[in-house]
Image (cartoon, grey):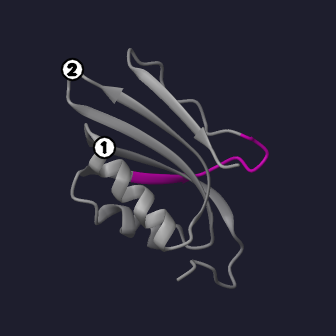
Amino acid sequence: MKFMDSRKNEEYSYYIASEDGPSSILRLIGILSRKSIDWKDWRLWRNKENNSQDIIITIHTGQPEKILNLFRTIPEITGVHYVESDSKSETIPKHPTREADELTVSAP
C-alpha cells in the first residue's frame, strides 16, 4: 500500500525518540519497506547514559499524519513529531550537538 494521493507531496522530517537498542530501528525499517514509503535520509543519535536514542528521518509524502500514526504503533517509541523540511536542502536539518555517536544513512 503506497501513501500517495492527489495532494502535493512534500518532504517532512520526523523526530523520533525511542528506547536504546535495535528493535525500534528494525520496526521502523519494516514499516518503511512494507508501506513503500519514499524516505530520503535518516540519522541516529544514541545516548548510552539514558538508554535512549533519537532518530530523524526525512520522508517524501502527501500524508504526513498517516505516517506519524504508523510510527506511533512502534512500542519502543517514546515520542514522535514531524515538521515540513526545506525542499532545497539535501540533508536533514541540523540536530543539536550531542555527546553521542551519530550515524547517517542516505538512500542510493
The correct choice, above or below, for 39 with respect to 106 in the image is below
User: Which quadrant would residue 22 be assigned to in this image?
Assistant: top left
Q: In front of the other: label 1 or label 2? A: 1
Left or right, residue 26 beside residue 83: left
- Dominant SS in magenta: loop
What element does badge 1 sit on?
Answer: helix
Count of numbered circles in the view: 2
Badge 2 amino acid: Glu
Q: Which residue is tagged 2?
A: 49
User: Which quadrant would residue 94 be assigned to in this image?
Assistant: top right
The correct choice, above or below, for 16 with respect to 96 in the image is below
At a point 68% along the width and 79% down the height, the residue shown is 7
Of the two numbered discs 1 and 2 on the same chain, state the one appearing first in sequence: 1
At a point 52% along the width and 83% down the height, the residue shown is 1
The correct choice, above or below, for 72 with respect to 91 in the image is below
Numbered mark located on residue 22 in the image: 1
Numbered mark located on residue 89 in the image: none
Badge 1 amino acid: Pro
Residue 82: x %, y % from top left: 48, 54
Q: Which stretch did the figure color magenta? A: 81-90
